[in-house]
Image (cartoon, rainbow, N blue to C red):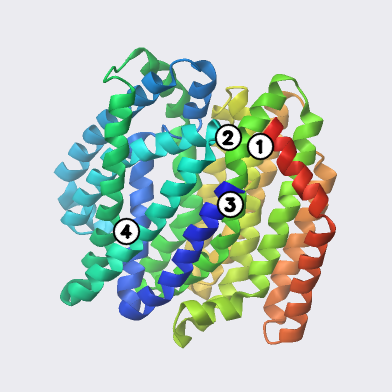
């Protein structure tokens, strides 16, 4: 609940500031900010090997008495990879500029961010794993407030270059926070870096680089391709739709932080029934959130942006439905990561990412940016099916009650996609929201019981 509340505050601030950004920046500028953030995440995977995901949680299990030492060692390994990566990127910048469409100072800013951000990510991952929610909550809220506040002040002051003001203001404010945790991990680890941890981490995560990269491209290549095939303004409209849709993800991300240690604990006892019951209930709550977001799309977009963004509401249903299938990855990957078989998820992700890029190229050119929502939905559905099949083959057990998950998934597809036809019918949409809220109240005891079960492990 603490993670969810912190995520809700962060998302709330994002929702509050988005209307300001869409009014202070031109659509082209807003679209370029989205492109920068997309490339930042892509470079983050390549420049840090995404060491804060997957392998770090395994390190918490394998080295319970040396977690400070392990965290610092992972930080130094991440820094070495980052320096090597950006030396190559900066030396080849004249060649790659045409692809990334970003100015040189923005590339340098990315390098600074990725040197220091892993410290905060490692600290957060450890706090979540150990269920120390108080400090995580406090710092999540601090970063949620500081970054947009500084960005908005910079936009007002530097009116002649609002794009740089938005990006540098927001990101350098966060870097200041990251530096604090960088120093903290150095001191906490007694400045002792153990290279013995590096080999296992590299062997675990290197096969996952194509997977992590494909996972992000699957969710974000749309924006890059829309920018190149349609224009930055269309990217801005699609980004607003994506921002609205992603509010549902905060529920899952908050829950998954506690679901990982719970899953690991139950897997050690082969208690798959308990895992299945918790996950199915979590997916039901998440499905309700997805449907609720879809029903409120017209009102939320009206608040978040100017009237010329309203056409973006028709991209929201497929994006939200795709987000529902996106989280299926965590459900199956948590099991594979426990059994240290991460390489199995890579195949499915690469297949669906290539499929997404091909479909985007065909349908965005033909039908415009809204088509990207539907191509992504199809690809996330394909990935969910592949991920489940791979998990069952690798583990030798189905683990989850797939009949329940299948029926729930079919219901989400039907309701979210049919919402396109009822956006003009306010009474119907609000009636659906009331029904969802009534069901949440009706099943509140089960939801509270699930939270207690995860807490007790």
Q: Which mark is residue 83?
A: none
Q: Do the residues labelled 1 and 3 touch (CB within 8 Å)?
A: no
Q: Quadrant of residue 37?
A: bottom left
350 or 394, which is in the foreground? 394
- Residue 446, compared with residue 52, is above or below; it is below
Mark 4 or 2 closer to N-term?
4
Residue bearing the label numbered 3: 4
Mark 2 or 1 closer to N-term?
1
Q: Do the residues labelled 3 and 4 touch (CB within 8 Å)?
A: no
Q: Position of residue 330 (x, y in %)?
A: 61, 41
Q: Residue 345 carries which label?
A: 2
Q: Position of residue 105 (x, y in %)?
A: 17, 55
Q: In what element is the residue under mark 3?
A: helix
Q: Distance between the residues labelled 3 and 4?
A: 27 Å
Looking at the image, which residue is at 51% across and 31% down? 54
Q: Is residue 358 visible?
A: yes
- Residue 214, compared with residue 141, is above or below; it is above
């Amino acid at each position: 609940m603490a993670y969810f509340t912190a995520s809700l505050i962060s998302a709330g601030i994002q929702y509050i500031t988005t209307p300001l950004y869409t009014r202070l920046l031109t659509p082209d500028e807003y679209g370029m900010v989205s492109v920068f953030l997309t490339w930042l995440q892509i470079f983050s995977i390549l420049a840090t090997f995404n060491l804060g995901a997957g392998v770090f949680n395994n390190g918490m299990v394998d080295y319970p008495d040396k977690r400070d030492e392990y965290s610092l060692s992972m930080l130094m390994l991440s820094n070495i990879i980052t320096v090597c990566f950006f030396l190559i990127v900066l030396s080849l910048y004249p060649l790659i500029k045409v692809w990334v469409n970003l100015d040189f100072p923005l590339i340098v800013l990315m390098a600074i961010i990725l040197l220091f951000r892993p410290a905060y990510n490692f600290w957060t991952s450890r706090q979540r794993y150990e269920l120390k929610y108080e400090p995580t909550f406090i710092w999540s809220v601090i970063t949620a407030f500081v970054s947009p506040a500084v960005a908005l002040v910079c936009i007002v002051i530097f009116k002649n270059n609002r794009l740089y003001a938005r990006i540098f203001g927001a990101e350098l404010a966060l870097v200041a926070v990251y530096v604090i945790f960088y120093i903290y991990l150095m001191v906490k680890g007694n400045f002792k870096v153990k290279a013995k941890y590096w080999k296992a981490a590299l062997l675990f995560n290197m096969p996952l680089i194509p997977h992590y990269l494909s996972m992000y491209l699957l969710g974000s290549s749309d924006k890059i391709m829309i920018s190149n095939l349609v224009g930055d303004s269309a990217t801005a409209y699609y980004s607003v739709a994506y921002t609205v849709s992603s509010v549902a993800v905060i529920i899952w991300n908050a829950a998954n932080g506690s679901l990982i240690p719970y899953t690991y604990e139950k897997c050690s006892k082969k208690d798959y029934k308990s895992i299945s019951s918790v996950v199915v209930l979590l997916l039901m709550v998440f499905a309700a959130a997805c449907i609720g977001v879809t029903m409120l799309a017209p009102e939320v977009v009206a608040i978040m942006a100017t009237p010329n963004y309203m056409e973006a509401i028709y991209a929201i249903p497929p994006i939200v439905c795709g987000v529902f299938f996106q989280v299926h990855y965590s459900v199956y990957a948590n099991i594979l990561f426990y059994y240290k078989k991460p390489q199995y998820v890579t195949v499915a992700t690469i297949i669906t990412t290539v499929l997404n890029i091909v479909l985007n190229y065909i349908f965005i050119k033909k039908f415009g940016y809204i088509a990207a929502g539907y191509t992504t939905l199809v690809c996330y559905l394909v990935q969910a099916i592949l991920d489940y099949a791979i998990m069952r083959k690798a583990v030798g057990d189905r683990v989850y009650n797939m009949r329940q998950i299948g029926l729930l998934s079919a219901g989400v597809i039907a309701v979210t996609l049919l919402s396109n036809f009822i956006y003009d019918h306010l009474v119907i949409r609000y009636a659906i929201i009331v029904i969802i809220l009534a069901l949440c109240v009706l099943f509140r005891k089960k939801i509270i019981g699930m939270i207690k079960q995860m807490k007790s492990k």
